[in-house]
Amino acid sequence: MIFALNSISSIAAHERWSPRLRTLTAILALSAIYFITGKLGLSLATVHPSASAIWPPSGIALAAFLLWGYRLWPGVFLGAFLVNITTQGTVATTLGIASGNTLEALLAAWLIHEAASGAKAFERARNIFKFVLASLIGTAVGATFGATSLTLGGYAPWNQYVNIWFTWWLGDLAGDLLIAPLLMIWVTQPYPTLRPLRIFEAAAVLVSLVLIGYLVFLGKTRAGLEFLAVLPLLWAAFRFGQRGAVTAAFFIFAVALWGTVHSIGPFGDVEAHQSFLYLQGFTATMAMAALVLAAVVTERIRVEQRLEVQEAVSRILAESHLNEAGSKILQILCERAKWSTGAIWNLDRESNDLVCMEFWHGPSAPARLFETESRKQRFAPGVGLPGRVWSSGQPAWIRDVIKDSNFPRAAIAAQEGLRAGFGFPIKVADEIVGVIECFSREVREIDDEFLRIANDIGDQVGRFFDRKRAEELLAKAKDELGKANEELENRVRERTVDLELANAALLKNIEEQKRLEEQLRQAQKMESIGTLAGGIAHDFNNSLNIIKAYATLIGARHSDQQIVEGVKVINDEIDRGASVVRQLLTLARKTETRLEPTDINKVLIMVSELVKETFPKNIDVRLSLDGMEPAVMADSNQISQALLNICVNSRDAMHTGGEITLAAETIDRDRMQDLHPGAAANTYACIAITDTGTGIEESVRPRIFDPFFTTKGIGEGTGLGLAMVYGIMKNHHGMIDVESRVGKGTTFRLYLPAVVSGQKSAVSQAGFGDRLAASGINQYATVLVVEDEQAMTRLLGDALLQAGYHVLVALDGAEAIELYRQHLNDIHVVVLDLGLPKVTGSEVVRRMKELNPQIKIIVTTGYLEPELKSELLAFGVKDYIQKPYSVESVLEKLQSVMSAT
């Protein structure tokens, strides 16, 4: 099998063949190997002709995928198909089994690649356990496919399903755990150097294997003595690593299999099927245990070598002079890490190439020719092993320098018997000043951990060289130290001044960063409130709308004074609830803002007059206006609302009276940049509201703009006042500051950008009703009312009937479209709620416009986003009514729309 797999390897690497021809040949070779070993395995089948406890092809397929990639899967599929079609079964059952065998190997290989380093899985003990787990999963898939295909095809009874599945699974698993490691290790790992003592010990291990194999597995022994085979397995694992462990395990398996087939040995005294299961379980367990032990031993040897190298290098660097450290480090690195020869290359800055400065080789195996060639060579960046390390700045490893296309000394290395090589850079402050390279007389697979340690050694050597050179320069500079001392002191003083200035700037930046973080936190809160407000506005206003309409109806039908007063209370509370929703939308910036040039002085005068008339007489209101105050782009209503909210808070903070001052001033762009570095480069108008109240505690101040936060008692405030102010200022691209001292008072400053020359008003879309012209009233028209709230539908329908209109009613979007299609020529106006089931209000508008481009639609909604409002207006909607509304407002809108041309 090893020879066959090496043949596939040679085919896959044949450079004279095209890639497709190489792949096709490798697939055919793999399918042939799979077929032959599969027939061998099925010849030992007992529980079913297609289910054998001995199945080497699973390990061969897994090894092939891990070594040469998934592109060889057709070879596994073809081989499995041929094995099973020539055994028993139909094409369908054979395809199912072949698919399972292929998928089994692909899944296990993918899991090993992802979790256990692929073909290098046996270099680490933890990866061997992952290899076992991946094999358990993959073989379970193959067994499931195979057993199911046989039972579904009628070639096995269902009562034998579990027995067939278990046999299939254990046979495939044993193949993965015995055959795959054997093939992968023998194909990938370099062959060891043959030394007399090593050959003698290998022969001794073989003799012990033959002796124990004969006595235990080929004789009449009792069960339990098979564990004597552990002894030579441990010997092979300790002394010969993974290759010895897996080879010894396979030898034990082969001997035990021969004995079991001939009904002798510890597994031969039971029924044949059970004996094969016991054999597979035993040998697979022993093989994995030996591999884990070999991996642990190998890892320990590597760790010890690396620690020895690091310790020796550190000692040399601590004890040696600069001119002798390099040669000692090279010698220690090669001796302790078992490398045959090595060289140090220094960078010649004038010629910009690498020159060999030191060369070392072991006394028992000199490499004179290679040393002579190395000392003659000079390497440019990217050329040879030293140039490759220099250009990349990273360690490099060559498995076999003789086969490397970028190794100019390959011919001399072949004469000297040098094979593997690695190199790493010597760095000083991230600048490469040299390269160290080492060579071995054996082919070695890449060792990433050793390369990392070597790279660290290069950095350590570079720091040593840098430090030693610095010490030499320091010794030369002692004579000039006196003269430089005074200059140094001057520089220190200058630097101190610079640091003080930098520290002040840093503190300023920190404060600015805190302010920006606070603004971001507040903006995030407002965004959350906006999402909440937009979500509840529609449903809440719908409910208020129904309550308001029926309350109005009750009031209209009863003249009893108590009922009338009760209805008035209900209407007042409805208005209050609608007002809270509007405040939420305003503070969340979910309402339209009408920006136009505004005189701040006029706004302050109006607000001051209102405050004087409504606040207690023990509160004085003062004005301090700026005669040069520029106009600002603002919504005067929203700014007035913001100022009134702040004034109300000031009033509540002055229980025994006090003074409120409303002031305005102009802030030029330079001063504004000092106050708010993030502000636009523009002149700003500043409105200051100062009171002499109780002030704001420091612990409370960070939360005053949070929605629903209030320090007032229950029922005395909603916690939305200052949050609305914050939202209004953000709508106006402005800023807000607050200063307060407990017991002294509070000052709020609102900054608004002044009007830039040539700036136009950013006025939102005008209301629908503003574009309507009054004309004749048609109270005998037909109105289609589309509303999903049945209570509101009944009330609105009755009111329209009493007003002389013909009424059609739809409770969802789909019904509305169908009604309009049926009565297209009769309907004059559609009163449409946007929040509809089945089909949305916006989609209903679009579909009706397709049916009749001249249709007149009035939209009713609990909440209408400005963007959607503009979209509906552009689409031809005539007007809208905000919920909660009264029946009278609906009749007015109908009259307005009907009378429009």
Image (cartoon, helix red, strand yellow):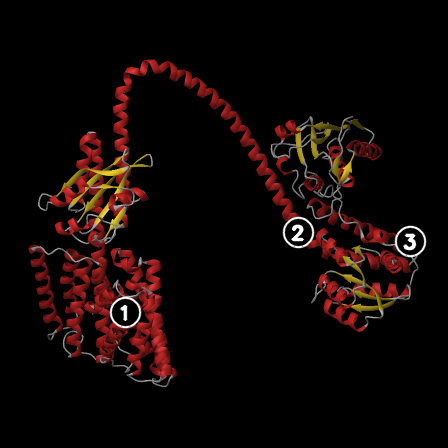
Task: State the count of labels.
Answer: 3
User: In the image, what residue type sits under mark 2?
Assistant: Leu
Q: Percent position (x, y) of residue 856?
A: 82, 62
Front of the two marks 3 and 2:
2
Please identify the quarter of the rendering in which residue 30 is found: bottom left
Query: Cα distance, mark 3 to mark 2?
Result: 39 Å
User: In the image, what residue type sits under mark 1?
Assistant: Ala
Label 1 or label 2, whichever comes before in sequence order: 1
User: In the image, what residue type sits under mark 3?
Assistant: Gln
For label 2, the SS is helix
Q: Can residue 713 be seen?
A: no
Numbered tag placed on residue 26 in the rendering? 1
Q: Which residue is mark 2?
A: 532
Q: Which residue is mark 3?
A: 561
Label 3 or label 2, whichever comes before in sequence order: 2
Label 3 or label 1, whichever comes before in sequence order: 1
Query: Cα distance, mark 3 to mark 1?
Result: 102 Å
